[in-house]
Image: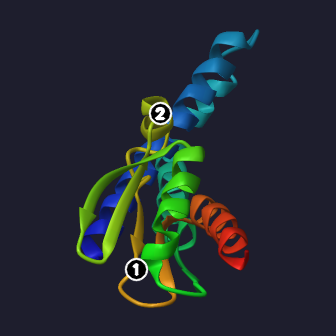
Amino acid sequence: MVKQYIRRILKTLLQFIIIIGLMLLIIYLTSRDSRDYGKLLTSKGAINMLYFLGFIALFYPMFAYTKKKVYLNHEFEKDRKSIEDIFAGAKYQLVKEEPGKLYFRPKSKLYRAMRLYEDTIVLDYTDNPIVFEGMRKDVYRLARYIERVVER
């Protein structure tokens, strides 16, 4: 779990550095007087920017990844087809199955690359409630869909 958290911190930091670098490049290329923007890249400015990005990256995985419980009215196997259909409708595919766990990933390679391949949603159905684990936005969205299907 600690290795996964550290990997997510490093990937987030890399993503932030790339985004900030592209923004600075665009500002530099589109500005009339590029000398003013050169001050941002001085050694002290760059170090301060890295500290800031590192601080954000340190806490980002804590808030971006979560677990969500969904209570089923009956056994998982009765709802399994509906749950897999919901994932398929959200453009996720089942990539791995272990006893009590299903692993889903998005089908889009671009979407996966933009998320730095930290996009797997793990569904643990060993107990009721079933537990989703993954990126907060996707987990909550898919869990809401499944809660609606289960209510019927």
Report the front residue among 41 and 12.
12
Q: Position of residue 115 (x, y in %)?
A: 47, 45
Disc 2/disc 1 C-alpha distance (Å): 25 Å
Say which residue label 1 marks: 125
Spot occupied by residue 103 in the image (x, y as percentages of width and height): 35, 60
Instruction: Pick the quarter of the image with the N terminus.
Output: bottom left
* Residue pictured at 46% horizontal, 67% vertical: 80
| Label at residue 108 | 2
Q: Is residue 21 above or below residue 1?
A: above
Say which of 43 and 130 sits in front: 130
Res. 139 image quadrant: bottom right
Residue type, label 1:
Tyr
- Report which quarter residue 19 is drawn in: top right
Asked which secondary structure carries label 1, the reply is loop
Which residue is found at the position 40% from the left and 79% from the top? 125
Dot 2 falls on a residue whose secondary structure is loop
Please give the name of the residue rendered at 58% of the width and 21% of the height, measured from the top-left corner.
25
Q: Residues within 10 Å of mark 1 (few under 14, many from 20)?
A: some
Which percent across, then down, holds residue 118?
Answer: 40, 53
**Side of 82 where 112 appears, left or right:** left
Give 70 or 149, whichever is nearer the viewer. 149
Q: Is residue 90 visible?
A: no
Residue type at numbered disc 2: Ser
Quadrant for the C terminus, please. Answer: bottom right
Q: Is residue 33 above or below residue 112?
A: above
